Image (cartoon, grey):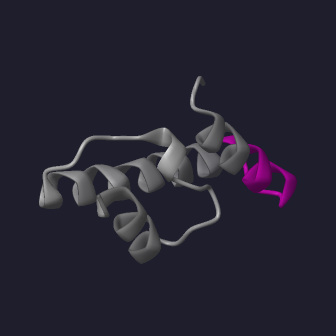
Amino acid sequence: MRDPSSKTYYAGLRQRGHSYARALRSVADRLLRVLIAMLKHGSLFDSARTSPSVGAAAAEEVVCSS
């Protein structure tokens, strides 16, 4: 609710016709991919470094490059 990139990602999914539940699962999946990347690389979360339009591999690279 308070992360601007997740909110934007969710709104985009809803505009494309995804149901509430499907959009919410997609946001959770995206955050889970970010969490896994952070754990793999021992980095901290920085919401300013993620973008709602990046894919899973790119999200890992964005979050973990320090």
In screen coordinates, is 29 left or right of 20?
Answer: left
Task: State whether residue 52 is above or below residue 5.
Answer: below
| Number of numbered discs on residues | 0
Residue 12, percent across and down? 78, 53
Residue at image position (49%, 51%) is 49
Residue at image position (72%, 49%) is 19
Task: State whether residue 26 is above or below residue 11.
Answer: below
Q: Quadrant of the C terminus?
A: bottom left
Residue at image position (58%, 43%) is 24
In screen coordinates, is 32 left or right of 24?
Answer: left
- Depth check: give the residue in front, 64 or 27: 64
Q: In which quarter of the view is residue 59 placed? A: bottom left
The secondary structure that most of the magenta stretch takes on is: helix
Residue 22, percent across and down? 61, 52
Q: Residue furthest top?
A: 2
Task: State whether residue 18 is above or below residue 10.
Answer: below
- Depth check: give the residue in front, 26 or 61: 61
Residue at image position (42%, 63%) is 62
Residue 7 among those drawn in magenta: no
- Depth check: give the residue in front, 26 or 60: 60
Residue 19 among those drawn in magenta: yes
In screen coordinates, is 13 left or right of 23?
Answer: right
Task: State whether residue 54 is above or below residue 34.
Answer: below
Residue 17, percent across and down? 83, 57
Looking at the rendering, the stretch of residues picked out in magenta corresponds to: 11-20
